Amino acid sequence: MKHIMSGIFAAAFALSASAAAQAQDKPPLKIGGILDMSSLYADITGPGSETAAKMAVEDFGGEVLGRKIQVLAADHQNKADLSANIARDMLDNQGVEMIYDVAASATALAAGEIAKARNKIIMFNGPGSIRLTNEACGPYTIHYVFDTYGQANVTGLAAVKTGLDTWFFLTADYAFGQDLEKDTSAVVTKTGGKVLGSVRHPLNTSDFSSFLLQAQASKAKVIGLANAGGDTVNAIKQAAEFGITKGGQKVSPLLAFVTDIDSIGLETAQGLLLAEAFYWDMNDETRAFSKRFQERVKRPPTSAQAGVYSSITHYLKAVKAAGTTDAAAVIKVMKETPINDFFAKNGKIREDGRMIHDMYLFEVKKPSESKGRWDDYKLLATVPGSEAFQPLEQSRCPLVKK
């Protein structure tokens, strides 16, 4: 009997060792970030998005379906052709199963086409163009954090309702800026306001003087900044230097992040109205995640970076539930499963790929109201996702059944 039992245990041990060896032999599950690591959007996404991705993987346990999870990241340098080449290399040569973030809209549109052609999941956290869930939508495309329609709808509507009803736009001359101007203009005119004009500036502009003088000459009550990152920071700082804000015109950043406000400073930024998908100091859950993130990055996460963590966690849970990395099976689980975490409550990914969740209207605090660095926002309104984002019946995504 002893010999029999010893044989059974030996066989069981051998099977266990064999299974472990097979698991180790499985290739890693690679997820790839295409990020702005060194230019005007680096603070919004960049190294912080890579860190958020790694935190999500670590918290998930580091492996799924017996495969180690590996996080890759590459710098697209805000070049659409480079972004497409990186996506192609990741998917064709490096064995990447899913692409995340892809900061900036032109680079996202380029990478999205590559992923679509290869039937791979791509999740957008940093870019904003509404085209990503309209004309450029795909069966495996997810737009997770914000978009130009949502930003325009929350900020523009609030401004016009308070009497700020004439607008002039400073617009970054690429897909994101153009869409943000278009969507905000639609909100302004629909609610009884007027658009008095606009001017387009190159990406990563250092001198806004000529553009701001045109905006000042328009006598518009609001100068809408249809740009982001370093462009938004520079435009607001220079508007203050030229005395435009003291002259009575309101500068409205149509997309701004807590990192932008920190760069500008509360003395200059106080009173700005802005829409955000996430703020680090909303509740105990947001504060707990942000504290862990700040220990690594030395500042709180932006909404895009918080969205990276949330979306990758949602993806990994779906892979586990589906029992495969096959895009069709995984995306089905992702769209069927509500998202409930520190980033979103009862979030849902629609058939056009838009993740629907609450948006928030904030006002930037006065220096006297702030308790310290990064204590920048006070909440004015919570806008349900069903009201903030483009209604499905208005979608131009060919996947939407009408």
Image (spheres, grey):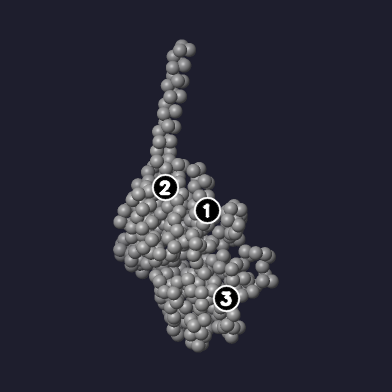
Q: Secondary structure at mark 2?
A: strand
Distance from disc 3 to disc 1, alpha carbons, whole Å, reads 29 Å
Please determine whether, in this image, residue 161 is positioned above or below residue 296. below
Q: Secondary structure at mark 3?
A: helix
- Look at mark 1 in the image and give the residue it sits on: 51
Residue 272: x %, y % from top left: 57, 74
- Please state if 375 lies on the left or on the right of 386 as rendered: right
- One can see residue 345 in this view: no
Residue 318: x %, y % from top left: 42, 48
Tell me if mark 1 has few (under 14), some (14-19) or many (20+) residues whose alpha carbon lies within 10 angstroms of its own: many
- Residue at image coords 37%, 67%: 131
Quarter of the image where one finds residue 257: bottom right
- Residue at image coords 35%, 47%: 326
- Look at mark 2 in the image and give the residue it sits on: 30
- Look at mark 3 in the image and give the residue it sits on: 237
Q: Amino acid at mark 1?
A: Thr
